[in-house]
Image: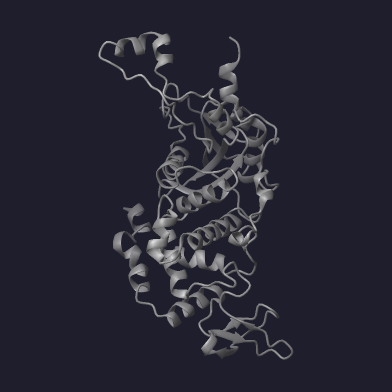
Amino acid sequence: MAKKSCNSVRGASRRDFAREAQYFTEDEAEQMLAEFRWLSPGQQICPSCGVLDRHYRIASRRQWRCRHVGCSHTFSVTSGTRFDSHKISFRKIIRLLIHAEASPKGSTLVATSNAVCMVEKCSQQNLMKIREAIMDNTDSPGQLKLSGTIHVDGIHVCGKFRRSNRRMKATSGSVLAVHGTTEVKRRLRSINPQSKGNQRRAKNKRVAIAMVEVDSQLGGARRVVVAMCRSENASDVMTLAQQYIEPGSRVFTDENPAYNKLGSCFEHFVVNHSVEYSTPEGVNENLAESFFSRVRRGEYGVHHGFRPMYMAFYVHEYAWRETYRRRTQREKVKQLASWLLAPGYSRYWRGYHGGNRRRHLRQPRPEIVMGSVDAPWQDARSTARKAPG
């Protein structure tokens, strides 16, 4: 009963904000965004001088003019933010945030365009700005470290292999042969990893490491932290664990040798997935696997593939959805709006369709823990399989 009382807001009551927002006028939408940004119904902060006051209102232009002597800066609710110089209405911004929040596995550009009534290029840029704001605020240096019980695992993303052009259909007489002889099984492979196209795609393969803190009261995940790596290796795993996990915490992983060194700083417990999903003592990493299932459905079912250049934006979006899944719709929209309307332009998406494509992102970014650029894409487990003996 205690668990139900802590999470009593369920069902339609969590979606009341969408019903309310569909009848917003442009003035009401602007007023709500102003409250989300400045946390005040009647006062504004001038982006130029930083004075909090009830500034002069220019109603015909939906702007304010700073009343501070010597400033007289003219600004709007989106000035100096990621939505600076926007061409869409405030109502569409609210609808965009509601649609982005309500898509558990992400949203396609066509679906967003139909829901918000904007072109696909505008949908792409604004959705990526939302993902950028999530990544900047959930992965900031001031975040508290994970503690308690942590589930850690990695998933291969990008570089999806393409099936072979030819395949042999199994007959009633070949079913036993498929499971009995390696020769027929090799002939029936639907994916050929040695083809030139798949070898080229393998270079784009990356590993997303997820660290999921267990909620001891409500159950499930309390907080999810993700990071992109070049491979699932011991060096990157140890660096991430020391950066995001409190020393002495209980860490549950699988039998991958990349996690063997975690026992030096944490209480490390291992589950052998070749034998069982969970040990009789309760050691498992099911929360990380559950998180990866939504990432995989988003990769294959919604976006039909990711690219390593922008993969970090997507995994941080899924981590945010997992962490704040118990919040109401109004709370999540308010959080996204406050992050998007914080001072500072978009680093990667300002002027994207004007030619500012940030080509340097094709190389590993320094703020993401990665191995060497020339490191092989295989992780430690796949390398061990190829070792002689």
Image quarter where the C terminus lies is: top right
Q: Is residue 328 above or below residue 176?
A: below
In the image, taking residue 67 as reference, residue 166 lies left or right, namely left
Q: Which residue lies furthest to the right in this view?
A: 70
Color style of the picture = one colour
Q: Position of residue 105 (x, y in %)?
A: 41, 49
Name the side, left or right, on which 42 lies relative to 265: left
Judge by depth and name the residue closer to the eye, 84 or 268.
84
Q: Height in image: 4 above or below 369?
A: below
Q: Residue furthest front?
A: 165
How far across and down, in percent of the image, does residue 254 sit? 51, 29
One can see residue 325 in this view: yes
Choose between 118 and 306: the one closer to the eye: 118
Q: Which of 204 and 266 is in front in this view?
A: 204
Pick the residue in front: 79 or 253.
79
Dividing the picture into quadrants, the one containing residue 194 is: top right
Q: Can residue 102 be seen in this view?
A: no
Residue drawn at point x = 58 percent, y = 34 percent: 267
Q: In this view, does 112 lie above or below 255?
A: below
Residue 117 x, y percent position in the rendering: 40, 67
Q: In this view, does 147 lie above or below 327?
A: above
Name which quarter of the figure residue 52 lies in: bottom right
